[in-house]
């Protein structure tokens, strides 16, 4: 779990809403309770006080998609930056950057929930967890502005050059799941590890691995580095891309 109840909360309040079948993926969010939206997702007032929204839908049924779109629009009308997440085998048109998670790529609903949780974690950690480098809401807005699709991958490695190894694993995950991820226009990368195991050289190395993998020479790469002593000798690389 990660905790959003700390001194840096004022930088960004993140809320997540799960529509219809997507409730099956909300277990990790339910444990803390702070990330889950309390009111109705389609009501603008439910989003007041938050800065960034994750709206998740779990299927392609017409009614659920309508609720999904209504929740996205309500959050946007309330002034929030919005990530839209759809668990389905093909994209739809929505008014926010859309991440597609194909159920065929996962072995269980728990694994899908962990993927969604990881996506929220990269944003939260990069903004709110003290580290070598932190980003802010303006950086996230720059990542999302004018984008239609999102892609996400994470990897954890240990040993010599763990950061580089994890970054290379991330590119493999992205290539396996998303045909067009290499054409992304913006990337947010967060390197996470103990204070002893990450430094600016490691962050730069991971950034270079991701940048070289991309096919878009004009891609804007934003990066951060967060401290998580619970990882011990392991180093995590989380990457969120937008196209």
Image (cartoon, rainbow, N blue to C red):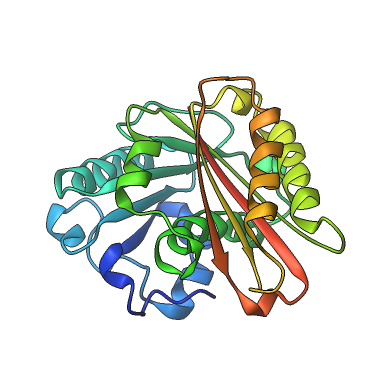
**With respect to residue 182, does 61 lie above or below?**
below
Classify residue 142 as left or right of residue 171: left
Residue at point 36%, 75% (across, down): 34
**In the image shown, does 138 or 57 lie closer to the viewer?**
138
Quadrant location of the N terminus in the rendered image: bottom right
Residue at point 15%, 44% (across, down): 77
The x, y position of residue 171, in whole percent, is 72, 38
The x, y position of residue 124, in whole percent, is 44, 62
- Residue 48 location, quadrant: bottom left
**In the image shown, does 44 or 143 lie closer to the viewer?**
143
**In the image shown, does 60 or 119 lie closer to the viewer?**
119
The x, y position of residue 91, in whole percent, is 49, 28
**With respect to residue 48, does 65 lie above or below?**
above
Classify residue 177 as left or right of residue 72: right
Classify residue 178 as left or right of residue 83: right
The x, y position of residue 143, in whole percent, is 40, 38
Classify residue 85 as left or right of residue 110: left
Residue at point 46%, 69% (across, down): 129
């Amino acid at each position: 779990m990660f905790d959003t109840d700390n001194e840096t909360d004022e930088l960004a309040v993140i809320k997540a809403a799960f529509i219809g079948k997507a409730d099956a993926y909300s277990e990790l969010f339910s444990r803390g309770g702070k990330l889950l939206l309390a009111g109705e997702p389609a009501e603008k007032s439910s989003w007041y006080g938050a800065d960034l929204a994750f709206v998740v839908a779990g299927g392609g049924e017409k009614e659920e998609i309508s609720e999904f779109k209504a929740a996205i629009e309500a959050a946007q009308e309330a002034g929030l930056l919005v990530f839209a997440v759809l668990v389905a085998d093909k994209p739809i048109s929505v008014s926010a950057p859309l991440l597609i998670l194909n159920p065929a790529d996962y072995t269980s609903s728990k694994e899908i929930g962990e993927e969604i949780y990881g996506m929220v974690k990269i944003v939260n950690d990069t903004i709110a967890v003290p580290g070598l480098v932190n980003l802010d809401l303006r950086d996230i807005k720059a990542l999302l502005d004018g984008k239609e699709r999102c892609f996400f991958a994470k990897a954890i490695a240990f040993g010599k050059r763990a950061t580089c190894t994890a970054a290379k694993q991330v590119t493999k995950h992205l290539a396996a799941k998303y045909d067009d991820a290499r054409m992304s226009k913006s990337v947010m990368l967060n390197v996470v590890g103990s204070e002893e195991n990450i430094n600016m050289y490691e962050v730069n190395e991971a950034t270079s691995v991701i940048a070289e993998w991309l096919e878009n020479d004009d891609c804007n790469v934003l990066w951060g580095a967060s401290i998580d002593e619970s990882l011990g000798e392991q180093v995590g690389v989380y990457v969120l891309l937008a196209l």
